[in-house]
Each structure stands twice: as C-alpha cells, then as structure tokens.
Amino acid sequence: MNKYQPSNIDVSWQQDPEHMGFVREHLGLTLDNCEKIPDMTRVATYRYARIQEQIVRNDCVGALLFSPMNVRYATETLYAPITNMHSPTRSVFVPNSGSAILYDLATPGLDSLPDFIGELRDAPVTAYFIAGDSYKDQSRRWAKEIADLVRSHGDGCRRIAIDISEPEFIVTLHSEGLEIVNAERIVERAAAIKSDDELLCIVTSISVAERGLTKIREHLQAGITEQALWAHLPYENAIHGGGWFEYAILASGERTNPWGRECSGKTIKAGELVSVDTGMIGPFGYGADISRTFHCKPTAPSPEQKRLYQTAIENLSFNIELIRAGMSFREFAKKSWNVPQEFWVRRYNSVAHGVGMGNEWPHIPFAMDWENEDEREGIFEENMVMAIESCIGREDGSECVKLEEMVIVTKGKCQLLSTFPFEEDLLT
C-alpha cells in the first residue's frame, strides 16, 4: 500500500483574522474578568425561552427534566451533578408557557432562583438508593401529581416530554392518559444555537482547558505516568471553578492506537507521541472539547510520526475551511476531507459534533457511514458550536495522532474558539 503524503500543512488559518475575530475580541475578557461576564441572568433567560419554543414546536404541554445537565440548561441551577446522574433528587417541570416548577430535595435553600421559576417543591425521590423498595409507590404517586399538572396546563393536550425516569413512573403516566415523548430532542435542539453570552461561557472554558494543555506540554518528559500528566488538566479546571470531565483520555505510544483509551499508570517514554482530549465541563457549565498531540523529547520525531501529524493537520484544515451556515450535515459529510484508505479503519467516529454543556447534537458521521434513509438530516445554522475532529493512524501502525478544534458556525468562514498552537517539531 502506498503511504499517503500530506500536501497542505499550512496552519496560518489559526492566525487568520477572518477566523479569529471572535476570540480576539473576547479572549481578554475571560478568566480575569469572569465575574463580570458573561451575564448569567441573560444566559438563563435565553435558554428558558429556547426550551419553551421547542416544547411548543413539539406540541407538548411541557417537559419534565431529570438530567442535571438538562435541569441546568433550563434553570441555571446546579447541585451535585454527578450524584444526580445516577440518583436524581432534582428535576424541573417546564411548561409550554409561563413559569417553571423546580423539584428539589437536597437544596431547598439555593441562594437565588431565576425569575421564571415560579415555584419550588420538595422532590419525590424515586431513586432506589434513597427510596429503597418504596420506589414503585413513590413513582406512582409522583406520576399522578405530574398527570394533574399536565391536565391543569394542557387545555386538553396530554403530551409531555421526559428525559429519564423509572419504568413505573412512565407506566403510571400512560395509565393516566398521558402521551410521552423524548425530551432529549427538545433540549438538544434548543441548545444547538448559542447566544453571544453562551459563546463567552465556552471561550472561558476553552481558556481554562488551554491552560491545562500548556501545563501538560510543560511537564511532558520521559518517566512521568499518563495519570500524573493528565492530572494537570483537572487541577486547572478545579482552581478556575470548572466542573467534571466526560472522560480522562490521555494516551502515549502504542496506547494511542486505537484511539480512545483513558489515562493509565503507564510510564511515558522518550520519543513517544502523547495525545489528549480535554473533554471537560469548565466554568459556567460549558464544555471544552479540544485534542492535541505532543512528542516526548529529547529525541526527534520520526518521519512516520511527522507524516501522521501533518496528515491530521491537513484533515483538520480542510474541514475547518469547508463548514458554513446553510450547508446541510449530509453535504458537509460528503464534501469533507477524503480519509485515505490506510487510515480508514482508525478514523474517528464522526467528522464533527456539536458542543455546549457537553458534547451535543449534531453528530456528523462520515459519508460512507450515512444510511440513505438516515433521519439525522439537518442544516448548520449561525452560532452553532462544533468540534472538528481528526484521528490519523494505521490499523497495523503503532501510534495515532488526535487533533480537534472548536469553532463557531457563521455564514462565512467559521470563527475559531480554540487557539492552542500546534507542534513545530512535528510540522517541520
């Protein structure tokens, strides 16, 4: 098999004023002045309006949300998000118009609530950890309360959106004559278009992630373990008020191929590639999803390591220049950089995906992975935030290179959000 040789490794687009306008205007306003911006009251009001708009579009009386990310999106309130992912004690009912009802067991004394939360109620907890074998009765009683709520808001409509719940809760809602639809579609569609304040939240998270990447680059040396190196990233996130990590992906040498392994106690050796995906929820609850690949000195990178890295750069550059508002997801997939056959098996699982309060819709598969009747159709719109992906490695090779940039979709050239520089020793 002939080895692919990249022909375009120009990364001047990283300094292109047309790509960098948003970051250059706002970057200095992030960490040092984060108590002043973004305006979180404005953020919360915007998001509540977005979610109510989607509730109406989906002909629902309202949405009952349990996922802590969805509750935060709808209300800008947060408590123990990881615990609430598996043992929910908080939820919110968002009607198609008017004020929300926040259910909360653990934190009835939240410092302040947005004006659009009209009522705070004790949460009937159905998680087995707390409810034990009474969870079935708790689920049924609460379902009847929600059914009454729907009837009082519905004007004859019995359609409600729910994200996650116990089976008994859903069964009882059905027995009460309610129609259940998936709330994830409602929240994901609402979250896809960011306000300017949300973009500032994301820039702040990226600033923290890039501080972490700087620490990783500075501390990368032979003899350090993957876990010790990755620890610089959560440290930076914690001291700047960030949240959790979706994963702890940092791998070195042969552990980069196939891509996706979380960090281990493996000792990094001189001459190895080290790849990291930030995958973090930073300040204000917004994600920073950036990937970079480094080379462990003092030895020089091999020709093969450079070839992989430069091919990933070419891949990334091509797709960043391609994406535009008004382009369909399928068109973008079809026109995206053509992955050479030798790298096809180790390609990433998407060409690009949305980012907001974590990884979000849309997820754009490669054209060859797109079924003819696939219902994942859609069109890029202004102020969508996308992560552009590249993973380059051979199935029979020893290492993979992972790169990823975050951008704002615009009518013209996309606006870069991530600004972390690429590695000169791998580019030359």
Image: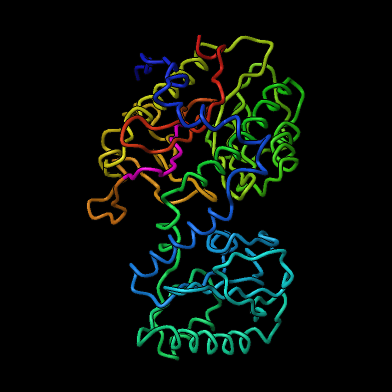
Q: Residue at x 49, y 72 (%)?
A: 94
Give the image location of residue 66, x and y in percent. 57, 69
Depicted 345 relative to depicted 73: above or below: above
Q: Residue at x 54, y 14 (%)?
A: 426
In the drawing, does residue 79 fall left or right of residue 92? right
Q: Which residue is drawn at 51% across and 26% down?
A: 24
- Asked if residue 410 can be seen in this view, the reply is yes
Depicted 28 relative to depicted 249: above or below: above
- Asked if residue 125 can be seen in this view, the reply is no
Give the image location of residue 111, x and y in percent. 72, 63
Quadrant in which residue 253 is drawn:
top right
Task: Check the image and name the residue furthest to the left.
Answer: 372
Name the quadrant of the N terminus: top left
Q: Which of 422 and 384 is in front in this view?
A: 384
Name the colouring of the figure. Answer: rainbow
Q: Nearer the viewer, residue 146 or 332?
A: 146
Give the image location of residue 400, x and y in percent. 52, 28
Q: Residue at x 57, y 40 (%)?
A: 288
Give the image location of residue 110, x and y in percent. 71, 66
Bounds of the magenta span?
380-390
Please tell me whether residue 384 belongs to the stretch shown in magenta.
yes
